[in-house]
């Protein structure tokens, strides 16, 4: 199948005065056309940085240190600023975490939608308004004509996130990167927004990278999951494989910390300790200090290998009997 | 004290301080200036306050390196025949004393007002309205108005006799709102916190909570504005002196030295104005630079550079 | 918006009352209206008689009421020195000061906006560091010293520009002496305006820069980048529009404060405006004139502050809507 996106050994460094911190460490990922991938991990695992690095929009001291991003067959990571600008918001759209902060408070919804179109195509204001209305209807905003003249603070959080989704749809992108799109919303609204996103991806054949710390959300929406820990992918595979048969001890721990998975004892299984800061990631396996299975071999860095369940895991302790065939 | 110094040496504070060349140089310059100002009686070659040592024949001599300069007076002399170098040292001492004194007074008024209005709701709107009005008027203007009123009350001759304490009073009265606002803001932020709630629950008195718990937490913003306020106070004093509402000519501050030289600038005697001008700007500049550094250090949220 | 306006205007009136009360009590306690009328050569008996006639022995509040009433009608008393109603004296001097403030504000706005934006967008570039370096020196330089330096360089050493006075003026509308219309007037205006703007310019640059840098870090600016907008659009529309709000509130007040600095600038350049008039009135103990200046300048400040708040309300949609409800 045609690859929509291929990330090859991508690393992102943050250069500080005294040291350089690696937030994303040699991550490889790919996405097929219309495929939905979830990137899961704790906050600070580097998943947002990875998401932003795809369109080279990492905040200031950060930069792509090595690796490449291939999108629709073009190496966009080598693009000039202007070339990359034409990709952003056109072929790849982003949805941000907190809808209350994402819209500019002093511009009307209409202005913020039209400018997005005008940045990428030659349209008259009237044409642009037509497209905006069409997309607002798609995200079920009632009476969209009136909405265009309103300011963000006149909307609720859920409505704003719908508007942001409408903005991301404006140019019919091939892929959407959604960075924790429901974290800042009420639980009831979270489900609505996720459903909407899923529906749109299916009808429009859009690829989706869903960045979240919420495994429940990911399992409903995505076809594949990448689990990130301390800047590296520790497990990658089909959603159902990972949810039902997690291989990496970290994934097992993550799932054990979900209430519905708590098991017969009714207790949540917490992973002991906390994820190390970027400056304190241990050599070898980054998870070894918190891992109950850690052994001497963990001093060398494990790589992703096919495991018995079908997913790939970066752990020396995971059985690989059936993987030799692949 | 030794313990404190030891702690200081190993702290973040000194770590960042010694890594910032601007902060380091500013501090060194400030130290030199302050030490020079306060040891003026020891290091100044002449005593500008002693009329017997002043010879009017020496007036308006250019700096020593100029053709008509005298080796006696390194930076030349002013219109009364006082050596510029010595007079500037004494003048800087007055400027610094007035600056520090005024800031001390401002801080005292401001902290009391800020604590009261942050802690007692009924006083808040009145006190803060006064502060707002005063700030919107610009503290300069207020200082000039108070100075003008004082001069009218006391008469010019008496005003000059007690000019230094009066200037401290004027600038202190004019600039306290800055402190009051800052302290109030951090009191409001602080009293939301749980430990204040806890202190209230165990029945500590209001005064004790304010004094022991809230006040120490307002210190870092107070420190941040204090450095800049010293610079402002020195500037205000110079401005008042320039308008004739400040230090008299026989006990000049840097500001009044600049003023007295202004008349002579047209006849080419630039040094009477320019040297004290440079000294004044240097003094204010290094304080401002240090103030910027302290602000960046204590408020890393702003440190985005 | 209407309720907001009413509240703001009511506040302004209250502040004006307080200012007039302070002004009046200065005048009441230290002024000598008898001297203003007849000079100093009168016997104590005559003096008492005149005081009675003028109502100067009435209770304080009664006199304040009378002062307020005539102040509203534009009568602020008579100047002892000029032997004229102070309103007349101040009106004659006001154009000089207002033109000076106007030109200085123009310099401040025209320079601070581009320089502030530039140094916020490219904080690490050499030019930005230079701008910031010069501006902190500017902040540390007393305005009268800047003025003196300008005079020394451009008048004494180079002889290019006149060092004092307003030069040739043209009378407009029968009362406004303008220096803006003649070459000579503009030549005289140049150095005082630059000196006056020198104190506000660095403050404005630093203000615009720090506000804009804060805005550039916000989520909505990040989102604007993610939408693939052109840099100009992100900087000048998304970021600058949000920078404007705090800059208007602080900046408007600062421009009003420039009136205070005219006292210094006008004294250096012997500019025949309200500022130098004030200092002269202090030296001459011309109480009525001095107090009137305080009241008039207070009035200007209050008007400027009120306007700034109202403009802020107009520009900021959040306030605007809140007022509408």
Image: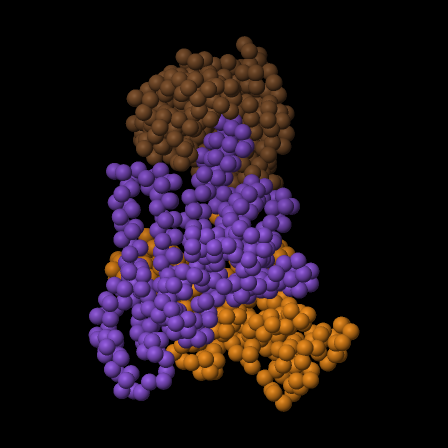
Instruction: Please name the residue shown 67% across and 86% down the image.
Output: B55
Residue A90 shows in this picture: yes
Residue B178 in percent (x, y) is at: 41, 60
Instruction: Please name the residue shown 56% across and 40% down the image.
Output: C121
Give the image quarter of residue B177. Answer: bottom left
| Quarter that holds the N terminus of chain A | top right
Residue C291 in percent (x, y) is at: 37, 68
Query: What color was chain B assigned in the picture?
Result: orange
Instruction: Please name the residue shown 25% across and 38% down the image.
Output: C325
Pick the front one: B75 or C146: C146
Depicted B254 relative to depicted B58: above or below = above
Depicted C54 relative to depicted A64: above or below = below
Instruction: Please name the residue shown 54% across and 32% down the image.
Output: C231
Give the image quarter of residue C23. Answer: bottom left
- The answer to whether B257 appears left or right of B267 in the picture is left
Residue A292 in percent (x, y) is at: 48, 34
Which one of the lettered chains is coloured brown?
A
| Quarter that holds the C terminus of chain A | top right
Which one of the lettered chains is coloured purple?
C
User: Colour scheme of this structure image?
Assistant: by chain
- The extreme front residue here reads C174
Residue A190 in percent (x, y) is at: 34, 27
């Amino acid at each position: 199948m045609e690859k929509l996106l291929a990330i090859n050994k991508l690393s992102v460094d943050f250069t500080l005065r005294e040291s350089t911190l690696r937030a994303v460490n040699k991550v490889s990922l790919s996405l097929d056309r219309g495929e939905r991938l979830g990137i899961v991990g704790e906050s600070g695992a580097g998943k947002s940085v990875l998401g932003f690095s795809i369109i080279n929009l990492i905040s200031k001291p950060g930069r792509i240190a090595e690796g490449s991003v291939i999108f629709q067959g073009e190496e966009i990571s080598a693009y000039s600023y202007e070339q990359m600008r034409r990709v952003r918001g056109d072929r790849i759209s982003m949805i941000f975490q907190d809808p209350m902060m994402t819209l500019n408070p002093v511009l009307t919804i209409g202005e913020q939608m039209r400018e997005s179109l005008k940045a990428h195509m030659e349209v008259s204001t009237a044409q642009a308004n037509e497209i905006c209305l069409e997309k607002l209807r798609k995200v079920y905003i009632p009476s969209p004509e009136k909405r265009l003249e309103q300011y963000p603070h006149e909307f609720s959080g859920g409505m704003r996130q719908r508007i942001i989704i409408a903005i991301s749809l404006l140019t019919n992108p091939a892929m959407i990167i959604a960075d924790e799109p429901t974290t800042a919303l009420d639980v009831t609204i979270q489900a609505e927004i996720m459903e909407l996103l899923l529906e749109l991806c299916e009808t429009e054949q859009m690829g989706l990278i869903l960045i979240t710390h919420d495994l429940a959300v990911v399992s409903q929406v995505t076809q594949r999951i990448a689990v990130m820990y301390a800047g590296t992918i520790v497990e990658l595979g089909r959603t159902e494989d990972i949810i039902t048969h997690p291989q990496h001890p970290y994934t097992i721990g993550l799932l054990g910390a979900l209430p519905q998975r708590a098991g017969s004892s009714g207790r949540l299984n917490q992973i002991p300790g906390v994820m190390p800061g970027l400056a304190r990631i241990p050599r070898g396996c980054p998870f070894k200090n918190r891992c109950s299975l850690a052994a001497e071999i963990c001093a060398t860095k494990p790589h992703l290998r096919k495991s018995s369940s079908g997913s790939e895991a970066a752990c020396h302790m995971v059985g690989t009997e059936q993987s030799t065939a692949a | 004290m030794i313990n404190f110094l030891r702690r200081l040496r190993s702290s973040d504070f000194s770590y960042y301080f010694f890594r910032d060349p601007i902060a380091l140089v500013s501090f060194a310059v400030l130290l030199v200036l302050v030490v020079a100002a306060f040891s003026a009686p020891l290091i100044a070659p002449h005593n500008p306050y002693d009329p017997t040592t002043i010879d009017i024949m020496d007036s308006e001599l250019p700096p020593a390196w100029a053709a008509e300069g005298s080796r006696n007076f390194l930076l030349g002399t002013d219109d009364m025949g006082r050596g510029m170098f010595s007079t500037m040292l004494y003048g800087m001492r007055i400027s610094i004393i007035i600056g520090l004194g005024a800031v001390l007074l401002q801080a005292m008024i401001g902290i009391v007002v800020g604590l009261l209005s942050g802690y007692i709701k009924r006083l808040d709107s009145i006190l803060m309205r006064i502060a707002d009005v005063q700030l919107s008027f610009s503290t300069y203007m207020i200082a000039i108005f108070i100075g003008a009123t004082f001069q009218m009350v006391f008469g010019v001759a008496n005003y000059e006799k007690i000019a230094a304490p009066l200037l401290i009073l004027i600038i202190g009265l004019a600039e306290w709102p800055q402190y009051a606002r800052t302290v109030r803001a951090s009191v409001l932020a602080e009293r939301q916190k749980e430990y204040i709630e806890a202190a209230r629950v165990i029945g500590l008195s209001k005064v004790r909570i304010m004094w022991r718990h809230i006040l120490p937490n307002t210190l870092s913003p107070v420190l941040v504005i204090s450095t800049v306020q010293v610079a402002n106070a020195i500037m205000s004093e110079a401005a008042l002196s320039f308008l004739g509402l400040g230090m008299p000519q026989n006990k000049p501050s840097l500001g009044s030295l600049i003023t007295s030289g202004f008349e002579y600038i047209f006849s080419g005697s630039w040094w009477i104005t320019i040297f004290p001008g440079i000294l004044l700007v240097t003094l204010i500049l290094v304080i401002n630079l240090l103030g910027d550094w302290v602000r960046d250090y204590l408020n890393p949220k702003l440190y985005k550079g | 918006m209407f309720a907001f306006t009413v509240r703001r205007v009511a506040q302004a009136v209250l502040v004006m009352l307080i200012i007039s009360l302070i002004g009046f009590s200065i005048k009441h306690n230290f002024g000598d209206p008898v001297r203003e009328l007849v000079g100093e050569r009168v016997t104590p008996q005559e003096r008492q008689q005149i005081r009675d006639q003028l109502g100067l022995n009435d209770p304080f509040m009664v006199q304040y009421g009378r002062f307020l009433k005539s102040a509203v009608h534009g009568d602020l008393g008579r100047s002892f020195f000029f032997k004229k109603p102070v309103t007349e004296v101040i009106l004659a001097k006001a154009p000089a000061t207002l033109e000076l403030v106007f030109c200085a504000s123009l310099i401040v706005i025209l320079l601070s906006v581009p320089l502030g934006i530039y140094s916020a967008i490219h904080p690490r570039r050499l030019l930005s560091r230079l701008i910031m370096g010069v501006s902190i020196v500017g902040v540390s330089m007393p305005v009268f010293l800047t003025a003196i330096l300008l005079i020394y360089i451009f008048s004494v050493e180079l002889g290019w520009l006149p060092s004092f006075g307003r030069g040739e003026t043209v009378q407009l509308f029968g009362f406004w002496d303008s220096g803006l219309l003649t070459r000579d007037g503009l030549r005289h205006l140049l150095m005082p305006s630059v000196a006056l703007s020198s104190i506000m310019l660095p403050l404005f640059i630093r203000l615009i820069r720090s506000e804009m840098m804060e805005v550039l870090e916000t989520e909505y600016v990040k989102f604007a980048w993610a939408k693939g907008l052109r840099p100009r659009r992100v900087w000048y529309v998304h970021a600058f529009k949000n920078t404007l709000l705090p800059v208007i509130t602080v900046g408007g007040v600062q421009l009003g404060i420039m009136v205070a600095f005219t006292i210094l600038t006008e004294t250096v350049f012997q500019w025949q405006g309200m500022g130098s008039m004030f200092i002269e009135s202090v030296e001459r103990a011309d109480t009525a004139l001095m107090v009137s200046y305080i009241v008039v300048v207070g009035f200007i400040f209050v008007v400027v502050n009120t306007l700034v708040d109202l403009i802020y309300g107009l520009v900021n949609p959040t306030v605007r809507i809140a007022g509408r409800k």
